[in-house]
Amino acid sequence: MIPKHLLAIESSCDETSAAVVRDDLAVLSNIVLSQDEVHAPFGGVVPELASRQHLKSICPVVRESLAVAGLPLEAMDYFAVTQGPGLVGSLLVGLNFAKGLAYFYKKPVLGIDHVQAHIESAFIDRPDLEFPVLALVVSGGHTSIFVLKKKLKYQVLGRTRDDAAGEALDKIAKFLDLGYPGGPVIQRLAEKGDPLRFPFVLPRMRDRSFDFSFSGLKTAAIRLVRENGITKESAALTDFLASFEYAVVRALIGNLTRAAEELGPKSLVLCGGVARNKRLRAAFEKAAAERGFPASIPSPKLCTDNAAMIGALAWAKIKAVKKELPLSLDLDAYPRSPK
Ligand code: KG4
Ligand code: ZN
């Protein structure tokens, strides 16, 4: 059988990415151009700057992804693109680019959900993961627990009621003027700190739901910074960051293990940008091993936003449909996950 290929594009936030993925899920290229330098002076993503930067980056990023894969655009059987959730201005750049290609080459274009694609990234390295799968998606924009009884069947079990975990890390880093994105900076500094020095009380949902809340932890962190006069030069900084990082990890893993014990899934998945965090990865692996659940975390490059995960989910959808896809160009962006 002649292998088929698709070109996937991701532009939902501040990474412009393009990947060529073969139908056996081999990732032939996965180019990611980060905009960190553009947004760093502002301590967070500036939506209008993000869309303008995508506009500049998308052609070279797509060109490079094809060059690395060693294939021309004509060889693509499908195009796939992130449809949402994300920043609408950013999403529209990728969507319109992919629709233009689909129109010119007369090939189908698939709109892909960004959060579901984060979950699918776990299957790139581990296609054998057994269902039901319980997945914790933790990123700068999302913190949710999903259960998948079977492939492509997503049920939200819990989500954040306010900030996402990555957002809380980024905001505390910004408050202390440590740089952007905050997650990796906090990880680096926290490595040398004592996670037990500063006490954080974890939020508890009255209704025993699996929802998260990080705004209380963020407010408690800011209070501790003020009360203890912590600055980026303080000797206590590393202990403080280790304690905060540890609190975020405990909140995430606490909910996940409670859900796992109640549902008894066959596999556990940790994904999204914050899944690069070493303390979180270690806590997740320990919690899964103690309860005998096979666990999977994508390789760090597949955790943060990338187009390979968009391509992987697109292939899963194409294979599930089992018929010719229409040449419709009717895709529109959506900013938030559908309820
Ligand atoms: O998945 P992602 O690239 O974008 C969204 O969909 O939001 O995640 C970005 C988030 C940022 O909040 C960033 O601070 C966080 O992932 N992050 C980390 C680490 N690397 C990235 N957080 C903690 N530790 C890390 N090593
Ligand atoms: Zn993401």
Image: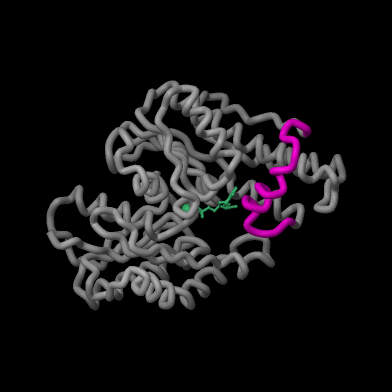
Which residue is nearer to you in this view: 221 or 151? 151
Position of 40 compared to 227: left or right?
left
Quadrant assignment, res 217: top right
Say if 278 sits above or below 17 in the image: above
Say if 301 sits above or below 330 in the image: above
Whether residue 283 is visible: yes
Marker count (numbered) = 0
Which residue is nearer to you in this view: 116 or 277? 277
Percent x, y of residue 317: 25, 51
Position of 67 compared to 12: left or right?
left
Which residue is nearer to you in this view: 298 or 16? 298
Say if 181 sits above or below 244 in the image: below
Magenta stretch: residue 27 in it? Answer: no
Q: Point out the image quarter for the C terminus.
A: top left
Quadrant assignment, res 259: top left
The residue located at (57%, 24%) in the rendering is 206
Percent x, y of residue 330: 27, 65
Magenta stretch: residue 184 in it? Answer: yes
The residue located at (79%, 41%) in the rendering is 223
The residue located at (79%, 45%) in the rendering is 237
Percent x, y of residue 51: 50, 70
Whether residue 330 is visible: no
Magenta region, residue range = 178-197
